[in-house]
Amino acid sequence: MGETIDSLIESTNHDLRQLNCRCTILRRGNYLSLRGTLPPKPGKAGKSHQQIIALGLKATPYGLRSAVAKAKAVSVALDSNSFDWGLLGVEDDTTIAGTVADWIKKAEEEYFTSRDRTKKTETTWRGHYLSMMQRLPQDEPLAVKLIETLGKSIPARQASNREDFCIAMGHLCKVAGLSMDLSKFRVKSTRKTELIIPTDDQIVEFYGQIQDKQPEWLWYYGMVATYGLRPHEPWHLDTRDLEKGGITIRVLENTKTGKRQVWPFREEWIEVFNLRQTYKLPIHDYTNKQLGKKAGERFRAPSRKVIMPWTLYSLRHAWAIRTLRMGMPVELAARQMGHSVAVHTKTYHHWISEVEQQEIYEKIMKKQ
C-alpha cells in the first residue's frame, strides 16, 4: 500500500479542494476517514468544528472511490443545510456502524501494519489485545456503552487486567474513530510497596535453602540472578556459548523486548549455581506473562517449606544495581536488560544517584 495509496489520496484531495468540497480524505493505518468541519454529533451541543470520522473503508483504490463519493455527498448536504449524521453511519455520539467483531478484525490489521507478524507480536496481540476485545458482545454494534460495561466488570483490585483493558480498548477506539476517556479505569496506587532488594550473600544463601526435586528450577533461579533476566526469559535462551565454557547467553526474539546478548554479573555464580548444566524448563501453552507468573508462584507458594522473601523481579533489580556498583556504563546495562536508557535511568535513578554520590565522595577524600 504505502506511497502508492498515499499519493492517490493526496491527488484526490487536491481534486476535491478544486471542487470546493468541504471534506478531505485521511488514511489512518489500513483504513480511510473523512476530515471536515461538521455539526456536533446527535446529543452534543456546540458549534460546527473539525472532526475525523472513520468510514470503515480499506485504504485501497476501490475504498478511495467510495470515500470520494461519501465526501461529495456530505459536502452537498452541508451546502444545502440538509446534513444528517446517518450519511456517515453515526446513529448517536457513542455508537458507530459495524459490529464489534468487524472492528476487531480491522484493529488486528491496523496492529500488524506497524510491526512484523512474529511469534512474539502474535503472543502480545492475543494475550493483551484480542483476549480483552473478545469479552465484548461480538454481534452488537461497537458502542461506548459496551466498553463502559466491560470496564466496570473488571474489579479494581485487578490492576493489570484494568491496564490491559485500557490498552486494548484504546486501540479499538482509535481504529473505529470512537472518542472515549479510558483513564478512569486505570488503577492508581495509593501507597508504595517497599521493594526488597536482596544482597549477593542473601541470593546465594537462599539458593542453598531451595528444596526442589526438579533441578531445572534451581538452574532457573541461578540464571535469573546471574543474568538479570525477566521471569519469562529463561524459557527463551540460547545457552550454547555457556555450555561450551563461555560466559554469555543470548535472549531470543520471542520475548518482551527481543534478541540480545547478556553477560554475567557475577561471573563466579556460573559455577556456584552450576549453570553450564542447562535444562529445558517445563513449558505449556502459556503467554510470557503467564510463564513469569507460574515461576513466581513456584518460589513463593505458601505450601513450600522455604518461601523466597523477595520476588523474581527483585533478582533482576539486584543485577542492575550490581552493574552500577561495579562500574558498568548505564547504556550497556540498559542494552543487556533489554530496555532503553531512559527506562533504565527512570527505574534505577535512586541507585544511580547513590553511586554517583559515592564516587564524588571518594574523589574528595583522595584530595585530603
Image (cartoon, rainbow, N blue to C red):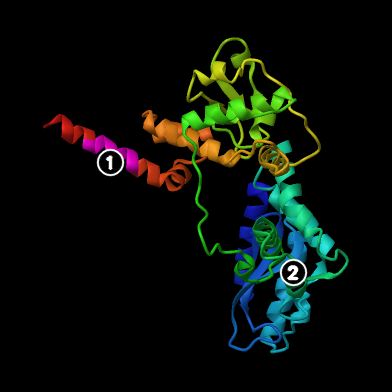
Tell me which secondary structure the magenta stretch mostly adopts.
helix
The image position of residue 161, as x and y in percent, is 69, 57
Look at 78% across and 53% down and name the residue there: 131
Q: Position of residue 282 (x, y in %)?
A: 77, 30
Element at label 1: helix
Query: Image check: 78 left or right of 242?
Result: right
Q: What kind of element bears circle 2? A: helix
Q: Which residues are magenta?
A: 354-361
Q: Amino acid at mark 2?
A: Ile
Q: How many marks?
A: 2
Q: Residue at x 61, y 19 (%)?
A: 275
Tell me the residue at 73%/88% (across/down).
82
| In the foreground, 42 or 199 | 199
Pick whichever of labels 1 and 2 is earlier in the sequence. Answer: 2
In depth, the one of 339 and 195 nearer the eye is 195
Give percent across and percent down for residue 70. Answer: 75, 72
According to the picture, the residue beneath numbered tag 1 turns out to be: 357
Circle 2 Cα neighbour tier, 10 Å, few/some/many (<14 / 14–19 / ≥20) = many
Q: Nearer the viewer, residue 359 or 58?
A: 359
Q: Is residue 56 above or below residue 211?
A: below
Q: Amino acid at mark 1?
A: Gln
Quadrant of the rendered image containing residue 61? bottom right
Is residue 207 rendered to the left or right of residue 99?
A: left
Instruction: Give the residue furthest to the front.
Output: 305
> Which residue is rendered at x = 72% and y = 70% of the image?
152
Horizontal and vertical percent for residue 60? 74, 54
Question: Which residue in the protein does label 2 denote?
Answer: 147
